[in-house]
Amino acid sequence: MSNRFYTSASSTLVRTRIVAKCFHRQRRFISSLTARRYPFGTAARPKFLSSLDRRGLCCNSHQHSTAASSPAVPASFAEWSGLSAWRFSKVDNRRVWGDKGPVARSGQASGDQDLCYSQTLAACAAEVLLTEDPKQKALLTHHAWQKFQAGGMPVGQAQPPPQPARPARPQLVPPKQVPIPKQSPLPLPVYMLHNLAHVELNAVDLAWDTVARFSHLGLDQGFYADFARVADDESRHLGWCLQRLEELGYAYGDMVAHSILWEGAQASTGDLAGRLAVVPMSQEARGLDAGPRLADKLVGCGDNRSAAIVSRIALEEKAHVAVGVSWFTKMAAAMGEDPGAVYRHCITSLGQQEALRPPYNHASREEVGLKQDWSVPLGHLASAHRHATACSKLLLSSRLIFPVNNWSLV
């Protein structure tokens, strides 16, 4: 036989061993993330998940699990100091931007949560994703969160739509066709607010998509509660932006926009680790980077009211990034991998290298747990990709667990 045959056979054996090791890792990983009891009973639980141990990160409680069986996170990792207070805070009804900051709408009814007719949180997520009007989307989001917080419904399961519903305006175009500020017909403050409103609209949908898309895994209810709370925060931010645009005599849809945020998240539809890396740890983190600069520009334009809104939004984005970092770090610990290396590999493997382009607000990122050395310069991504062997095993394992468009996993 030729050397070529022996080389091929040897490569096949190596690949087989890698896949076998990944399979054992995925068993440990899914064991640490699946709930101890399936919400719809063992008969409805996917056979693949039912065959695995029920231990680790997850529990049936609505509270966040601190069980001793949770995988140990790196000793150097410390959660953002404000994360616990954010997680257990009351429903925030300050949906209107008043003279001195956010306030509750006058005459706001306490029973408005009845407008959400879905019986599970995941079904509410799908319902919001199918809602076109931005104001109605924000309102429905808030009502769903109120109902869930009141203990009125379980997480449940639902399949999200392939794309969220969108209003007729703005027209969605490729990013290069979105005009730069000097070429836009809108005044600079309106231009910046319109872009921010579009970002917040996408953020609402992405948070709910995360709830629905991974609802079939039966994770710790704290995971779904975190992202439902994120969705509620983003819906409040969206409402402030829409209100301010109207005050300035404009409306959402008065200029074109792009769908790059949603397209970027689509790469992680079958990969929970990738979803956390792309959305809260990259897209949301951009709010920490750009928020202060955007507020300064608005002050320079003489629009202090808009600047105050942007500053408040940037401040509240810290919790959203911290949530992603917290869950991502626990996932990496369950796999026995370095979270920074896993993060870089997820970003490069999913083709989201633009998420690592400077400038960064390292002070704010470090505060919420997003380490500076996790975001390597673009010039080093190729070598980081080649040498991340352990991370590639994690990514393969993650994709075996969460295959794209396979909801039954049977």
Image (spheres, rainbow, N blue to C red):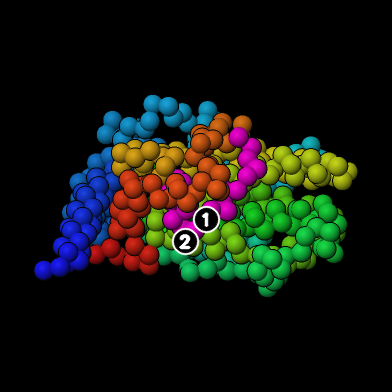
- Image quadrant holding the C terminus, namely bottom left
- What residue is pinned by disc 2? 267
User: Residue 209 location in percent, x, y?
Assistant: 48, 58
Structural crowding at the residue carrying mark 1, measured as other residues with C-alpha within 10 Å and reported as few (<14), some (14–19) or many (≥20): some
User: Quick check: 9 above or below 23?
Assistant: below
Q: Find numbered disc 1 in the image and state the secondary structure of the residue it sits on.
A: loop
Which amino acid type is marked by label 1? Gln
Magenta segment boundaries in residue numbering? 343-362
Furthest toward the front, the residue is: 2
Rendered residue at 81%/45% (across/down): 298
Residue 87 is covered by the magenta coloring: no
**Image position of 25 with respect to 319: above or below:** below
Question: Which of the 4 image quadrants contains residue 8?
Answer: bottom left
Q: Nearer the viewer, residue 208 or 396?
A: 396
The kind of residue tagged 2 is Ala
Which secondary structure lies at badge 2? loop
How far across and down, in percent of the image, does residue 320 sit? Answer: 55, 43
Given residues 295 and 389, the one toward you in this image is 389
The answer to whether one can see residue 69 in this image is yes
Q: Residue at x 34, y 58 (%)?
A: 399
For disc 1, the marked residue is 352
* Labels 1, 2: front one: 1
Image quadrant where residue 42 sits: bottom left
